[in-house]
Image (cartoon, coloured by chain):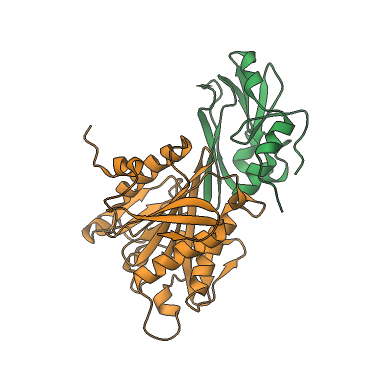
Chain colours: A orange, B green
Amino acid sequence: MAVGPSTRSWAITFADPVPYLEGVRIQEAIHAARLADAIPDTVLLLEHRPVITLGRRGRDQFLLSSRAALTERGVDLFTSSRGGDVTYHGPGQWVLYPILKLGGSEASSRGYLHHLEEVAIRTAGSFGVTAYRREGMNGAWTDAGKLSAIGFHIKRWVTLHGLSFNVRSGLDGFRHIVGCGLVGEKVVSLEEVVPGDPKPGMGEVGMALLNAFSGVMGRCLDVYPWQAGDLPEVLAQIRRPQSS
Amino acid sequence: MESPRNLRYTNTHEWVKGTKELKVGITEFAQEQLGELTFVELPAVGDSFAAQEEVGVVESVKAASDFYAPVSGTISAVNEELQDRPELINSDPYGEGWIFKITPDDEAELDQLMNADEYEEILPQDD
């Protein structure tokens, strides 16, 4: 299936929540393949198993629960190579990890960060929710709180990590942190702010994220489910559990 | 954006000044992509690096980006001022925002770098 205009890129969708470190392994393998020009720009769309991650300088004063308490609740804790402060990922939240060679239109004057924010804002907009940027506070916000968080890493000018977008209410893990180190700011999910019923499902919101990404970045996406039998060979090799 | 004509450039957006001891920073384009910088992880004086090896990291509110050795060599100085004022890279990337100095193992490696015209070719064309 293909979505959107011009430059061809790949999108990989994951049906089941991905453990955080497995997500990192896949991203790094795709990053290496992208650097080597073995694959086009690729974006991953996935949910994580419950995890709290710290930005690379890991300011854990924004962690409200002890590591032991988190482990007891089945929440992992890792330090990530991305920028930004502490955040939570878990089922009910989409994570979008674009692995892009910066240098094309996505890196024009207002920059990649601006484009990522735009993806979240347009996705919210497609469900009738007004989201916006706040000066000096990256991400996408609604009047009720923060809907989408952003943190990325640029390694050899190819991006890693990206944005998270809260879909379902009751994303319990946020209780354990001060999201992005922002004291007194609320986190919301699309379900809590979308007008009317029925609320959009995860699949619908995931597709809207890919559509927004395609529009904002000017990409035509070839979408591959991670478990698909016809995954391109490069990706199939990354999918295989390491034997060595 | 105009890149200073007297500098040489890498494809990872570092600029390089000099020949015997090279002064290195990141370009106007690079700092603009990252936004206001909040932290710089500097190498240690005396550390040796191969060309294109990761030397340190600059971090903004949401982004972390590595920077690289333009040639093989040994770090001879770092801009300590950046510890307290990383934003100097934003306000004056080619001047007060320099990041480190490196003494090349082999000056011939400098020939691999781009001049300003060549560097501008790899930048996105703004509309």
Residue at coordinates 38% horizontally, 76% vertically from top-left? A200
Coordinates of residue B81 in the picture (x, y in percent): 65, 37
Residue at coordinates 32% horizontally, 48% vertically from top-left? A231
The C terminus of chain A sits in image quarter: top left
Residue at coordinates 53% horizontally, 77% vertically from top-left? A143
Q: Is residue A240 visible?
A: yes
The quarter of the picture where residue A49 lies is bottom left
Query: Position of A159 compared to A76: left or right?
Result: right
Coordinates of residue B66 in the picture (x, y in percent): 53, 38
Q: Is residue A157 above or below residue A91?
A: above
Q: Is residue B36 above or below residue B46?
A: below
Q: Is residue B17 above or below residue A185?
A: above
Coordinates of residue B28 in the picture (x, y in percent): 69, 42
- Give whichever of B98, A191 is nearer the camera: A191
Residue at coordinates 49% horizontally, 57% vertically from top-left? A150
The N terminus of chain A sits in image quarter: bottom left
- Give whichever of A57, A80 is nearer the camera: A80
Q: Is residue A181 visible?
A: no
